[in-house]
Amino acid sequence: MAGRGGLLMLENFIGGKFLPCSSYLDSYDPSTGEVYCRVPNSGKEEVEAAVEAARAAFPGWSSRSPQERSQVLQRLADLLEQSLEELAQAESKDQGKTVTLARTMDIPRAVQNFRFFASSILHHTSECTQMDHLGCLHYTVRAPAGIAALISPWNLPLYLLTWKIAPAIAAGNTVIAKPSELTSVTAWMMCRLLEKAGVPPGVVNIVFGTGPRVGEALVSHPEVPLISFTGSQPTAERITQLSAPHCKKLSLELGGKNPAIIFEDANLAECIPTTVRSSFANQGEICLCTSRIFVQKSIYSEFLKRFVEATRMWKVGIPSDPSADMGALISKAHLEKVRSYIKKACMEGAQILCGEGVDKLNLPPRNQAGYFMLPTVITDVKDESCCMKEEIFGPVTCVVPFDSEEEVIQRANNVKYGLAATVWSGNVGRVHRVAKKLQSGLVWTNCWLIRELNLPFGGMKSSGVGREGAKDSYEFFTEVKTITVKH
């Protein structure tokens, strides 16, 4: 809905109704730096209303058959698909990513999330064992856990929100979702489709606002037994502290400092364009992006030359430009944070080969105040540098040489994170060997970001707790019970 001054005014969606809020936050268009939308600045009161609505909807929704719930998810997927272009334009304007990326990745994946879980919910089986000598039969049943709190980030707004909503409601739970206050528009647009899809009031509630106000009230609520969160490690620590007194079930998908390991027998014709994409896709604002590139010494100078050339071809432009590879970063504060890492690298004696401070960024006058920066390649950087240790979450990657397989495995593992890695080599034995030794929840070899949604997704170490996927999400969003019958 339009508010004063023509700004888009969002409303919370609670119990099947759009409800106004007493205070609002400004939301900016990253490509211009201008306020274009107002987001509810909700708090405890709105969370309480959402819990009430979710509680009331749970008995009816959880008692529906998986087939009935599946049909509702399929209808919602169809409605999202019919609105694909409108959603892609909105996601791009709200987040800063290119319309092309929103159109080809974010929104199609949101549609696929509902289709995938609509199908997978029909195929789970339970366990059964017999103890004939005691005349007993044991079997398991799974039941939805209740109200799930779903907290999603700003980098892939609808994509990651639906990755949580779909499995949660497919399993029979009701949900309260809190999208990032920086990117709330597509979540609000999806709410407009829920009734038409046949989602009963109170099954999906969306409360907009900040982590300290909405997030804290939600995760500490005694009637919310499940929390699924994707975001930063400090926020995850806070969620863990607040939820600890209630022994809640947590799924935490956090950051990464993902290595690419490029051996001398790598196919550089495939490796270089893929590694440019894995470093800079979505402005480098994907938890799976490559930010440390280890290249075997014998090919290091050739790789570097070709990689920098390819990076310079990666076009930064306004999000609506169909030829742009990269749009604007999410916020002014985030842009400054990313730039600060490049300053620190320079102070440590590193070389900036292209990008920030080296090349000129050309933007139309209207976008001069937008949050843009060029993809940046850093070399001559030590493994102990903050640029090699901390998640920057922007279009910045470091390239360093290595000698041996054993050495590079040790160096790749020498960070607190363990989310994703890529390995480039033509040697099948080496690929399997290295993948096994990397402390990483996902390892792609000779490719990047090819996802199989059936299999577990998630990280080790400080990259999170738990996994998501067909079986893993189902197990997370349900409680298992073992029943013994003596006959």
Image (cartoon, rainbow, N blue to C red):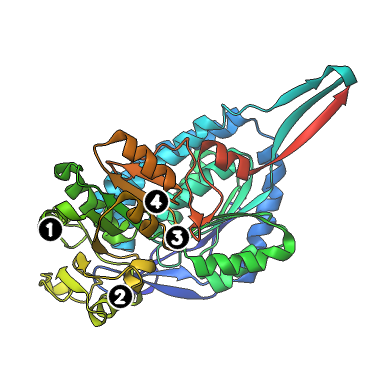
Does 424 sit above or below residue 225? above
Contact between marks 2 and 1 (CB within 8 A): the answer is no
- x and y percentages locating residue 467 in the rendered image: 53, 47
Question: Could you tell which of marks 1 and 4 lies nearer the N-terminus?
Answer: 1
Does 119 sit above or below residue 235? above
Amino acid at the residue labelled 3: Tyr
Disc marking residue 417 = 3
Question: Could you tell which of marks 3 and 1 lies nearer the N-terminus?
Answer: 1
The Cα–Cα distance between marks 4 and 2, rounded to whole angstroms, is 21 Å
Contact between marks 3 and 2 (CB within 8 A): the answer is no
Amino acid at the residue labelled 1: Ser
- x and y percentages locating residue 324 in the rendered image: 16, 56
The Cα–Cα distance between marks 4 and 3, rounded to whole angstroms, is 9 Å
Secondary structure category for the residue under label 4? strand
Which dot, 3 or 1, sits closer to the camera?
A: 1
Secondary structure category for the residue under label 3? strand
User: 366 or 245, which is in the foreground?
Assistant: 245
Question: Few, some or many C-alpha atoms within 10 Å of disc 1 (few <14, some 14-19, many ≥20)?
Answer: few
Which quadrant is the N terminus positioned in? bottom left
Which dot, 3 or 2, sits closer to the camera?
A: 3
Amino acid at the residue labelled 4: Ala
User: What's the residue at 13%, 60% (across, down)?
Assistant: 308
Does 307 sit above or below residue 483? below
Disc marking residue 301 = 1
Disc marking residue 420 = 4
Note whether residue 213 is visible.
yes
Secondary structure category for the residue under label 2? helix
Question: Could you tell which of marks 2 and 1 lies nearer the N-terminus?
Answer: 1
Residue at numbered disc 2: 341
- x and y percentages locating residue 321 in the rendered image: 16, 57
The Cα–Cα distance between marks 1 and 4, rounded to whole angstroms, is 25 Å
